Amino acid sequence: MILSRVAFAIPVLFVMTFLTFFLASLIPGNVALVLLGPSATVESVQALTRDLGLDKPVLVQYFSWVGNALHGDLGKSIYTGDTVSHIVLQRFWPTLSLALLAAVVSAIIGISLGLFAAIKGGALSRILDTLGMVGIAVPGFWIALLLIVVFSGQLRLLPAIGYENPSEDFWGWIRHLILPVSAMALAGIALIAKQTRDAFSEALSRDFIRFLQANGVPRRSLLFRHALRYASVPIVAAFAVTFINFFSATATLEIVFAIPGLGSQVATATANHDLSVLQGAVLAYTIVTVVTILLADIIYSLLNPKVGTR
Protein backbone atom coordinates (compact mmCIF):
# COMPACT_ATOMS: atom_id res chain seq x y z
CA MET A 1 0.00 0.00 0.00
CA ILE A 2 2.80 2.41 0.93
CA LEU A 3 4.63 1.79 -2.35
CA SER A 4 1.44 2.37 -4.35
CA ARG A 5 0.85 5.66 -2.49
CA VAL A 6 4.42 6.78 -3.18
CA ALA A 7 4.03 5.81 -6.84
CA PHE A 8 0.81 7.85 -6.97
CA ALA A 9 2.62 10.85 -5.48
CA ILE A 10 5.10 11.13 -8.37
CA PRO A 11 2.59 12.18 -11.06
CA VAL A 12 0.93 14.48 -8.49
CA LEU A 13 4.28 16.27 -8.03
CA PHE A 14 4.67 16.67 -11.81
CA VAL A 15 1.12 17.97 -12.28
CA MET A 16 1.34 20.45 -9.38
CA THR A 17 4.73 21.85 -10.42
CA PHE A 18 3.71 22.13 -14.10
CA LEU A 19 0.47 23.92 -13.19
CA THR A 20 2.52 26.38 -11.15
CA PHE A 21 4.77 27.04 -14.13
CA PHE A 22 1.80 27.46 -16.45
CA LEU A 23 -0.18 29.74 -14.12
CA ALA A 24 2.90 31.83 -13.30
CA SER A 25 3.46 32.38 -17.03
CA LEU A 26 -0.02 33.97 -17.21
CA ILE A 27 0.80 36.63 -14.58
CA PRO A 28 0.97 39.96 -16.42
CA GLY A 29 4.23 41.92 -16.42
CA ASN A 30 7.83 41.50 -17.58
CA VAL A 31 10.31 40.27 -14.97
CA ALA A 32 13.30 41.70 -16.84
CA LEU A 33 11.66 45.12 -17.00
CA VAL A 34 10.82 44.99 -13.29
CA LEU A 35 14.43 44.09 -12.44
CA LEU A 36 16.01 46.75 -14.69
CA GLY A 37 13.53 49.52 -13.93
CA PRO A 38 11.36 51.71 -16.15
CA SER A 39 14.38 53.55 -17.62
CA ALA A 40 15.86 50.36 -19.15
CA THR A 41 16.32 50.17 -22.91
CA VAL A 42 14.46 47.63 -25.05
CA GLU A 43 17.78 45.94 -25.91
CA SER A 44 18.79 45.49 -22.27
CA VAL A 45 15.35 44.09 -21.38
CA GLN A 46 15.54 41.62 -24.27
CA ALA A 47 19.07 40.59 -23.26
CA LEU A 48 18.10 39.96 -19.63
CA THR A 49 14.99 38.05 -20.77
CA ARG A 50 17.26 35.72 -22.81
CA ASP A 51 19.73 35.36 -19.91
CA LEU A 52 16.90 34.31 -17.57
CA GLY A 53 15.56 31.86 -20.16
CA LEU A 54 12.17 33.56 -20.14
CA ASP A 55 12.04 33.81 -23.94
CA LYS A 56 11.69 30.02 -24.21
CA PRO A 57 8.33 28.16 -24.29
CA VAL A 58 6.84 27.24 -20.91
CA LEU A 59 7.33 23.51 -21.53
CA VAL A 60 11.04 24.01 -22.24
CA GLN A 61 11.44 26.12 -19.08
CA TYR A 62 9.57 23.49 -17.05
CA PHE A 63 11.61 20.48 -18.20
CA SER A 64 14.80 22.45 -17.69
CA TRP A 65 13.68 23.12 -14.08
CA VAL A 66 12.76 19.44 -13.57
CA GLY A 67 16.18 18.32 -14.85
CA ASN A 68 17.96 20.63 -12.42
CA ALA A 69 15.60 19.74 -9.54
CA LEU A 70 16.34 16.03 -9.98
CA HIS A 71 20.01 16.92 -9.36
CA GLY A 72 19.09 18.88 -6.22
CA ASP A 73 19.31 22.30 -7.84
CA LEU A 74 16.10 24.32 -7.40
CA GLY A 75 17.70 27.49 -8.79
CA LYS A 76 18.23 30.93 -7.26
CA SER A 77 16.01 33.85 -6.45
CA ILE A 78 16.27 36.44 -9.21
CA TYR A 79 15.99 39.18 -6.57
CA THR A 80 18.22 38.10 -3.69
CA GLY A 81 20.52 35.61 -5.43
CA ASP A 82 19.96 33.15 -2.54
CA THR A 83 19.47 29.50 -3.42
CA VAL A 84 15.82 28.44 -3.44
CA SER A 85 16.52 25.42 -1.21
CA HIS A 86 17.97 27.77 1.46
CA ILE A 87 15.01 30.15 1.23
CA VAL A 88 12.45 27.33 1.39
CA LEU A 89 14.16 25.62 4.35
CA GLN A 90 14.44 28.93 6.21
CA ARG A 91 10.75 29.67 5.69
CA PHE A 92 9.48 26.12 6.09
CA TRP A 93 9.85 25.74 9.88
CA PRO A 94 7.80 28.78 10.97
CA THR A 95 4.94 27.62 8.72
CA LEU A 96 5.21 24.01 9.91
CA SER A 97 5.27 25.18 13.56
CA LEU A 98 2.16 27.29 13.08
CA ALA A 99 0.16 24.67 11.15
CA LEU A 100 1.18 21.68 13.29
CA LEU A 101 0.55 23.38 16.64
CA ALA A 102 -2.83 24.67 15.41
CA ALA A 103 -3.77 21.17 14.20
CA VAL A 104 -2.72 19.56 17.52
CA VAL A 105 -4.66 22.15 19.55
CA SER A 106 -7.68 21.60 17.27
CA ALA A 107 -7.42 17.83 17.75
CA ILE A 108 -7.12 17.95 21.56
CA ILE A 109 -10.04 20.37 22.06
CA GLY A 110 -12.12 19.09 19.12
CA ILE A 111 -11.94 15.41 20.07
CA SER A 112 -12.74 16.21 23.72
CA LEU A 113 -15.78 18.31 22.75
CA GLY A 114 -16.94 15.76 20.18
CA LEU A 115 -16.74 12.85 22.63
CA PHE A 116 -18.54 14.82 25.31
CA ALA A 117 -21.30 15.86 22.87
CA ALA A 118 -21.74 12.27 21.62
CA ILE A 119 -22.04 10.88 25.15
CA LYS A 120 -24.18 13.63 26.66
CA GLY A 121 -26.05 14.80 23.53
CA GLY A 122 -28.89 17.30 23.97
CA ALA A 123 -28.07 20.99 24.33
CA LEU A 124 -24.32 20.44 24.12
CA SER A 125 -24.68 18.81 20.71
CA ARG A 126 -26.73 21.78 19.44
CA ILE A 127 -24.19 24.24 20.85
CA LEU A 128 -21.48 22.32 19.01
CA ASP A 129 -23.42 22.65 15.74
CA THR A 130 -23.67 26.42 16.28
CA LEU A 131 -19.99 26.73 17.15
CA GLY A 132 -19.18 24.67 14.08
CA MET A 133 -21.01 27.10 11.80
CA VAL A 134 -19.36 30.08 13.53
CA GLY A 135 -15.92 28.51 13.25
CA ILE A 136 -16.32 27.84 9.54
CA ALA A 137 -18.01 31.17 8.69
CA VAL A 138 -15.79 33.61 10.60
CA PRO A 139 -12.58 34.46 8.67
CA GLY A 140 -9.32 33.64 10.43
CA PHE A 141 -7.82 37.09 9.83
CA TRP A 142 -10.79 38.75 11.60
CA ILE A 143 -10.27 36.54 14.65
CA ALA A 144 -6.55 37.33 14.44
CA LEU A 145 -7.18 41.09 14.51
CA LEU A 146 -9.62 40.66 17.42
CA LEU A 147 -7.05 38.66 19.41
CA ILE A 148 -4.36 41.26 18.72
CA VAL A 149 -6.61 44.09 19.93
CA VAL A 150 -7.58 42.25 23.15
CA PHE A 151 -4.42 40.35 24.19
CA SER A 152 -1.76 42.66 22.77
CA GLY A 153 -3.41 46.07 22.66
CA GLN A 154 -5.62 46.04 25.78
CA LEU A 155 -4.17 43.40 28.11
CA ARG A 156 -0.54 43.59 26.85
CA LEU A 157 -0.05 39.90 27.60
CA LEU A 158 1.32 38.66 24.27
CA PRO A 159 3.33 40.10 21.36
CA ALA A 160 1.22 41.17 18.37
CA ILE A 161 3.74 40.37 15.64
CA GLY A 162 7.06 38.63 15.04
CA TYR A 163 8.61 35.18 15.38
CA GLU A 164 11.39 33.72 17.54
CA ASN A 165 13.60 30.77 16.68
CA PRO A 166 12.86 28.05 19.30
CA SER A 167 16.56 27.09 19.51
CA GLU A 168 17.39 30.66 20.59
CA ASP A 169 14.38 31.56 22.75
CA PHE A 170 11.90 28.73 23.34
CA TRP A 171 9.56 30.71 25.59
CA GLY A 172 9.61 33.61 23.14
CA TRP A 173 8.73 31.17 20.33
CA ILE A 174 5.72 29.92 22.34
CA ARG A 175 4.55 33.45 23.20
CA HIS A 176 4.74 34.59 19.55
CA LEU A 177 2.73 31.58 18.34
CA ILE A 178 -0.12 31.63 20.89
CA LEU A 179 -2.23 34.23 19.05
CA PRO A 180 -1.78 32.94 15.46
CA VAL A 181 -2.31 29.33 16.59
CA SER A 182 -5.49 30.36 18.44
CA ALA A 183 -6.80 32.27 15.41
CA MET A 184 -6.13 29.33 13.10
CA ALA A 185 -7.38 26.58 15.42
CA LEU A 186 -11.00 27.76 15.75
CA ALA A 187 -12.12 26.36 12.38
CA GLY A 188 -10.18 23.13 13.01
CA ILE A 189 -11.78 22.62 16.43
CA ALA A 190 -15.23 22.95 14.87
CA LEU A 191 -14.47 20.45 12.07
CA ILE A 192 -12.83 17.81 14.28
CA ALA A 193 -15.46 18.14 17.04
CA LYS A 194 -18.33 17.57 14.59
CA GLN A 195 -16.52 14.68 12.90
CA THR A 196 -15.73 13.09 16.29
CA ARG A 197 -19.29 13.46 17.56
CA ASP A 198 -20.84 11.98 14.39
CA ALA A 199 -18.35 9.10 14.16
CA PHE A 200 -18.57 8.29 17.87
CA SER A 201 -22.40 8.46 17.88
CA GLU A 202 -22.48 6.11 14.88
CA ALA A 203 -20.09 3.73 16.67
CA LEU A 204 -22.28 3.69 19.79
CA SER A 205 -25.29 2.67 17.69
CA ARG A 206 -23.54 -0.42 16.22
CA ASP A 207 -24.71 -3.92 17.14
CA PHE A 208 -21.31 -5.04 18.43
CA ILE A 209 -21.38 -2.23 21.04
CA ARG A 210 -24.83 -3.38 22.22
CA PHE A 211 -23.54 -6.95 22.34
CA LEU A 212 -20.54 -5.95 24.47
CA GLN A 213 -22.77 -3.87 26.73
CA ALA A 214 -25.18 -6.79 27.19
CA ASN A 215 -22.23 -9.02 28.17
CA GLY A 216 -21.19 -6.69 30.95
CA VAL A 217 -18.18 -4.95 29.43
CA PRO A 218 -17.39 -1.90 31.65
CA ARG A 219 -18.69 1.39 30.25
CA ARG A 220 -15.26 3.04 30.26
CA SER A 221 -13.79 0.18 28.21
CA LEU A 222 -16.86 0.18 25.95
CA LEU A 223 -16.48 3.89 25.17
CA PHE A 224 -12.74 4.45 25.00
CA ARG A 225 -11.48 1.06 23.84
CA HIS A 226 -14.11 -0.29 21.46
CA ALA A 227 -16.27 2.65 20.29
CA LEU A 228 -13.42 5.16 20.04
CA ARG A 229 -11.28 2.72 18.06
CA TYR A 230 -14.16 2.11 15.65
CA ALA A 231 -14.65 5.88 15.22
CA SER A 232 -10.96 6.72 14.97
CA VAL A 233 -10.56 6.38 11.18
CA PRO A 234 -12.79 9.37 10.25
CA ILE A 235 -11.26 11.34 13.16
CA VAL A 236 -7.75 10.72 11.79
CA ALA A 237 -9.01 11.76 8.34
CA ALA A 238 -10.40 15.01 9.80
CA PHE A 239 -7.06 15.71 11.52
CA ALA A 240 -5.11 15.09 8.29
CA VAL A 241 -7.43 17.35 6.28
CA THR A 242 -7.21 20.04 8.97
CA PHE A 243 -3.41 19.97 9.01
CA ILE A 244 -3.18 20.13 5.19
CA ASN A 245 -5.65 23.03 5.11
CA PHE A 246 -3.72 24.88 7.82
CA PHE A 247 -0.33 24.30 6.17
CA SER A 248 -1.53 25.45 2.75
CA ALA A 249 -3.44 28.49 4.05
CA THR A 250 -1.01 30.20 6.40
CA ALA A 251 -0.21 33.16 4.12
CA THR A 252 -2.88 35.51 5.50
CA LEU A 253 -2.03 34.89 9.17
CA GLU A 254 1.71 35.03 8.47
CA ILE A 255 1.22 38.47 6.93
CA VAL A 256 -1.04 39.66 9.80
CA PHE A 257 1.39 38.45 12.50
CA ALA A 258 4.58 39.21 10.49
CA ILE A 259 5.75 35.58 10.64
CA PRO A 260 8.55 34.89 8.12
CA GLY A 261 6.96 31.69 6.79
CA LEU A 262 6.47 29.94 3.49
CA GLY A 263 3.01 31.40 2.89
CA SER A 264 4.13 35.03 3.05
CA GLN A 265 7.15 34.09 0.89
CA VAL A 266 4.81 32.67 -1.78
CA ALA A 267 2.81 35.92 -1.77
CA THR A 268 6.00 37.96 -2.21
CA ALA A 269 7.41 35.65 -4.90
CA THR A 270 4.15 35.77 -6.86
CA ALA A 271 4.04 39.57 -6.78
CA ASN A 272 7.71 39.74 -7.87
CA HIS A 273 7.48 37.06 -10.60
CA ASP A 274 10.20 35.16 -8.72
CA LEU A 275 9.32 31.87 -10.38
CA SER A 276 12.16 29.76 -8.96
CA VAL A 277 11.17 30.59 -5.36
CA LEU A 278 7.48 30.10 -6.13
CA GLN A 279 8.20 26.71 -7.71
CA GLY A 280 10.33 25.60 -4.75
CA ALA A 281 7.61 26.59 -2.29
CA VAL A 282 4.93 24.73 -4.25
CA LEU A 283 7.18 21.66 -4.30
CA ALA A 284 7.44 21.87 -0.48
CA TYR A 285 3.66 22.23 -0.12
CA THR A 286 3.05 19.24 -2.39
CA ILE A 287 5.56 17.03 -0.56
CA VAL A 288 4.01 17.89 2.83
CA THR A 289 0.52 17.11 1.49
CA VAL A 290 1.60 13.77 0.00
CA VAL A 291 3.52 12.75 3.15
CA THR A 292 0.55 13.68 5.38
CA ILE A 293 -1.85 11.58 3.28
CA LEU A 294 0.64 8.71 3.32
CA LEU A 295 0.96 8.86 7.13
CA ALA A 296 -2.83 9.01 7.47
CA ASP A 297 -3.15 5.90 5.28
CA ILE A 298 -0.62 4.04 7.44
CA ILE A 299 -2.50 5.01 10.62
CA TYR A 300 -5.80 3.90 9.02
CA SER A 301 -4.34 0.46 8.28
CA LEU A 302 -3.03 0.16 11.86
CA LEU A 303 -6.39 1.14 13.37
CA ASN A 304 -8.44 -0.93 10.95
CA PRO A 305 -6.53 -3.61 8.93
CA LYS A 306 -9.47 -3.89 6.49
CA VAL A 307 -8.66 -0.39 5.21
CA GLY A 308 -5.15 -1.39 4.21
CA THR A 309 -6.31 -4.30 2.11
CA ARG A 310 -8.68 -2.30 -0.08
Image: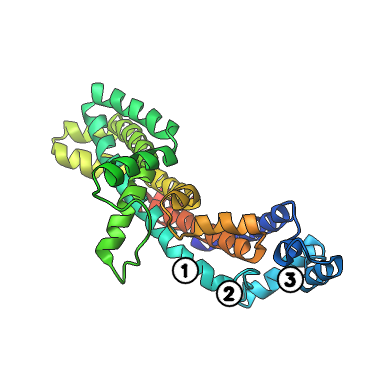
Q: Residue furthest bottom?
A: 71
Using the rendered view, name the quadrant where residue 114 is placed. Answer: top left
Q: Earlier in the sequence, mark 2 or mark 1?
A: 2
Q: Which mark is residue 64?
A: 3
**Mark 1 highlights which residue?**
90
Residue 1 visible, this angle = no
| Residue 168 locus on image (x, y percent) | 30, 71
The residue type indicated by label 1 comes to: Gln
> Which residue type carries mark 3?
Ser
Q: How many marks?
A: 3
> Is 17 on the left-hand or right-hand side of 155?
right
Left or right? Give the position of 238 relative to 19.
left
Which residue is tagged 2? 83
Pick whichever, 157 or 214, lies toward us: 157
Label 3 residue SS: helix
**Position above or below: 214 against 18:** above
Work out whether mark 3 precedes mark 2 in sequence or the reverse, and give the earlier one: 3
Q: Is residue 287 visible?
A: yes
- Give the alpha-carbon distance from disc 3 to disc 1, as whole Å: 25 Å
SS of the residue under disc 2? loop
Q: Amino acid at mark 2?
A: Thr
Query: Which of the two residues, 1 or 289, is positioned nearer the viewer here?
Result: 289
